[in-house]
Image (cartoon, rainbow, N blue to C red):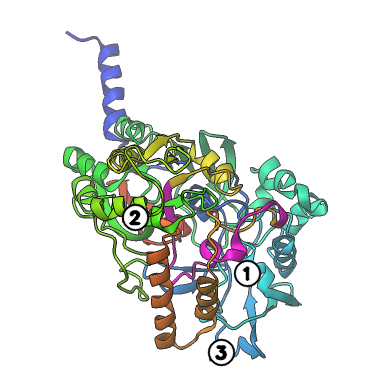
Amino acid sequence: MPTLRALAFALLALIGLTGPVGAKDELVIGITQFPSTLHPSIDSMMAKSYVLGMARRPFTAHDAQWRLVCMLCVELPTLENGLAKIEGKGIALTYAIQPKATWGDGTPVTSKDVVFAWKVGREPTTGLANQELYTRITSIDVLDERTFTLHVDRLTFDYNAIHDLDVLPAHLEAEAFARPAEYNTRTTYQTNPTHPGLWFGPYRVAEVSRGSHIVLEPNPTWWGAKPAFRRIVVKAIENTQAMEANLLSGSIDMIAGELGLSVEQALAFEKRNGARFAVTYKPALFYEHIDMNLSNPALADRRVRQALLLGLDRETMTRQLFEGRQPVAHGMLSPLDSMHAEVTRWPHDPTRAAALLDEAGWKGAPRRNAKGEPLALELVTTAGNRTRELVEQVLQSQWRKLGVDIRIRNEPARVLFGETLPRRRLSGMALYAWISSPENVPRSTLHSSMIPAESNGWSGQNTGGYVNPEADRLIDAIEIELDEAKRRVLWRALQEIYATDLPALPLFWRAEAHVLPLWLKGVTPTGHLGPTTLWVETWRPEG
């Protein structure tokens, strides 16, 4: 007969496996990456966006229905309501900050913080990921403590969407910005990320264990609906198999759809454990692709890029791996996007691929150029992501049949997105995803002015170094075309250039697989750049 102590241990084990009885006041979330920084404007990582969605708010965002809404602002300025006024070729936009918005140390969020953020964003040596909006704002009029007018140098079709204007606490950051070239290492977000004064969302960052986890606790100065959890822990588990094990053991409560299991992993997981968890799939504007260093002599030749895509059987790969839930990507804009157009396609055609490589001077098996040098390319992705590592092996195998030598070398996400890509240290190719918002003009990723370099503080996300004057012209024209029909024509032309030139190799459109505990309610997937955490105050435990 088992002892009382043995029965107690058995009960504890059962509780650990099946979850707590009654409502929870702590939520533990698993994601596959750890942010390289928590500064809202330095580096571009979904892991950071996911965490910051709980601890701050953008001025504007697209909601789960893909509508543009105010978050930190009170009302969207429009030409109709008079808060937007045309000024020559530009526009003046007047915003009011939420009247109760307050940094976690009790300091109000004011127009002064907006002006300070603008000055930081315009400084070329700060190393911000995307400086475009800051440079377009020519001046800011402070109307009062909570109201300001932005003077923007051009009138764009999405003129009142200012997602990228990340307000910063001037009372904490001014000293760090005194030496702009050193700002990215001196910022309080780097030196003291748990300072309450950095945060003004429903939660604030209370603990940072680099590479491991981030703890968030309710922010007493939050102006909105009271959040339900006493504590939220975001754990970085880079290996997706380990992520599943942590979920089943009770070490985490949920897996974020934005950075969690791939669709095929989630499908397999649901078949085994669907009675214990709620698994939802959200088609998304997530574009899995292969970025290329276009300074690499082999990849600089468009014929080589086209041959590489022709050498891939993407239809079979996505069907076998994802059961048809993640369609092949033929261009840069998702079929879900209103501006999507049908463009040139590159079906699996090894014969045509071989002919293009021959034409480009890469002949034989394995492929060599006239100097006898092999066509050898390095491929890197986020280490520990089982699906990407599997896709890498498929790519390597299919390209080997063309005589192309692919050498796999993977890195932790914080290294790939924090150093390798933004500093243009990529020697060959990188497999990862771009995450977009509806009708998102790809200036930062495609325009030649957005190539990161030491001279511009490594700003911009055109890490491949793509240069095409016609693409630049179309991007410029799309942004300022207010007529939707005319804009659609421009979009089609840009998509065709992308599909023909192939500055990146499109693979497939991802779907988010959200794995949630049955007791958690209120999580609404968006399917775009805005993470679910932007509405974390609506998340509630049931029971």
Amino acid type indicated by mark 3: Leu
Is residue 287 rendered to the left or right of residue 470? Answer: left
- Residue type highlighted by circle 2: Leu
Task: Identify the residue under disc 3.
Answer: 79
Task: Kindly identify which numbered label has been placed on residue 69.
Answer: none
Q: How many other residues sit within 10 Å of disc 2, few (<14), some (14-19) or many (≥20)?
A: many
- Looking at the image, is 350 positioned above or below residue 467? above
Can residue 534 be spotted in the picture?
A: yes
- Assess whether residue 452 is covered by the magenta stretch: yes
For residue 356, the mark is 2
The label nearer to you, 1 versus 3, is: 1
The mark that comes first in sequence, 3 or 2, is 3
Q: Secondary structure at mark 1?
A: helix
Q: Position of residue 535 (x, y in %)?
A: 45, 60
State the residue in front, 260 or 422: 422
Gap in angstroms between the C-alphas marked 1 and 3? 20 Å
Mark 3 to mark 2: distance in Å?
Answer: 52 Å
420 to 131, vertically: above or below: above
- Residue 133: mark in rendering: 1
